[in-house]
Amino acid sequence: MSLAERYDRVVAATVRTVTDRRYLLRTGMSVAGGIAMWASFPPRNLWFFGIVSLALLCGALSEPGLRLRSGAWCGFAFGLAFYLPLLPWIGVYVGPLPWIALSVVLAGYTALFGLIAVVLMRFPARALWFALAWVSIEWARSSFPFGGFPWGRTGFGQIGSPLLSLAALGGVPLVSFAVAVIGAGIALLIADGYRDRSSLRSVRVLAAAGAAIIIAPIAAAATWPSVNAHNTSRDSITIAAIQGNVPRLGLDFNAQREAVLNNHINETRALIDAVHAGSVPRPDFILWPEDSSDIDPTINLDASQMLDSLARSAGVPIVIGTVLENQDPDTGNTHETNSMLVWDPNAGQPADATVGPGPGRYDKRIIQPFGEYLPWRSFFRLFSSYADMAGNFHPGSGPGVLKINSGGTWTTVGVSTCWEVAFDRSAEKSVRNGAQILAVPSNNATFGRTQMTYQQLAMSQVRAVEHGRTVVVAATSGVSAIVRPNGTVVSRTGIFEPGFLVARMPLHSDKTIATRLGAIPLYLAVIATIVGLLVVMVPRTRFNELITGRRRDRGARVDARGARDTDDNGSH
């Protein structure tokens, strides 16, 4: 066969595939599923669309005899339809290339999910395997490469959902699992019930799918009282969050450092005036956002004096966000850290401010690739002139908490700075190390008036439920908020508007089941997925035959072959 003939055959086969009705239906269902998943995320918060989304994707993947490449394509189409509308904030000031490139890479993960799901859904309890594979792929893209990209995990789209209470049992992975198993159960209930309406197998299928649909909501309902139990406490604290705003939008806001610092000073003075007037209660401490003082107050005398005066006037500690220059005592080289400092009204800057992480200083531990540092700098600078604008920050260490003394009473505050709130291990480590409340200082000014800040606030709400802690969010340009331990918002600011928030909130020292278990449920899901794949890849094991029924099928084929042979020999 000539090369031209082979080419014609490939083209003809491709055309037949693309025009095949089932192919178009699967692709349409996958795209619709991706769009539905996007609709479940803030600021829309249509959480039930998350279930609809995965029901559509499971329906596309549940067709009998579906090829692996078709499953991968369905996953890829779903991913593009989800990530492209979810992440345009990435390219708001740097152009569409990073946004589109990241969306394609993330869609590659959902393509891998589609392939894995087709393999594992050959087993019974298909909704369970679908959900295990979904959670495992969320773990993979939240971990690799460059530390992963957890944005868009299904559990973060369940604000307002009764399933959110499951976060107190197993964190974000369990919420994602519940959405996936319910969606898959609904899809299989419809699809298999239609295909096998008259068979005994349909009874088993319908029972399994029905169980998948009802178990997760029952578990969520059973969990809800225990979640609310974390909302009652004899200990409480009055906290304040400052949103100073930035002078103008764009990537050059850091060049406006003095103006940003002055904005937060002025808004804090407005808070102090309101306290003196009796219109708001006196806070026990004041939280500023990340980058609220990019002028390093440990070396800049003017900034230090202004903060000293402000803290004395407030009479309470102020937690400020700044960028510190750190010198390696061995090499003499310097590097930057994204830090939070407790500015005391009596002592000024913390004693450990110039030394390293300690009770009065927190250094951001999970730094953002392509923002705070640039991996493979020489490679990525070939694609965008903005590459060299990435920082050269180093990750911090330590327990992830600040110790704040207000009137002789000490409070342990866990910190997850901006990007860190998306990672399970950040808040978990802080709470394990004694955090009584959680603070999320953030700087979203570089993302303009996009959906990013609302998506990040949703993560803070999930963390509140997950660990049973009050969460206070302070953002330079919004949205700042104070969140109850049950995930509801007490108060919030507008976007790109200066303001302050004050509320008396409970302190907690107990730990939820999710905090105690940590990543164990997630790792169990990943291990189960891997074991399932290994069983399929080694088809002649007894376990594989027991689960898939292939042994029985092979025996039936042997009997049929023997019957044909006897017929041919005229024995019967």
Image: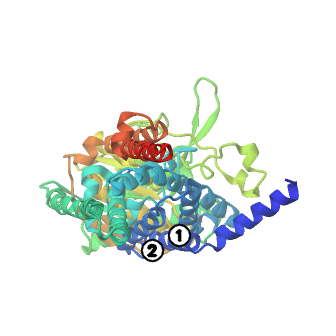
Q: Nearer the viewer, residue 472 or 411?
A: 472
Q: Is residue 86 left or right of residue 136?
A: right
In the image, which is nearer the foreground, mark 1 or mark 2?
A: 1
Looking at the image, which residue is at 54% across and 44% down? 144
Mark 1 vs mark 2, CA separation in Å: 20 Å
Across and down, in percent, residue 102 comes to: 62, 58
User: Pointer 1: residues within 10 angstroms few (<14), some, or many (20+)?
Assistant: many
Across and down, in percent, residue 238 comes to: 25, 61
- Residue 356 in the image: above or below residue 525: above
Q: Is residue 438 left or right of residue 72?
A: left
| Residue carrying label 1 | 26
- Residue 295 in the image: above or below residue 396: below
| Residue carrying label 2 | 39
Q: Nearer the viewer, residue 27 or 503?
A: 27
Q: Secondary structure at mark 2?
A: helix
The amino acid on which the numbered mark 2 sits, given as a three-letter code, is Ala
Looking at the image, which residue is at 53% across and 57% down? 110
Q: Secondary structure at mark 1?
A: helix
The amino acid on which the numbered mark 1 sits, given as a three-letter code, is Arg
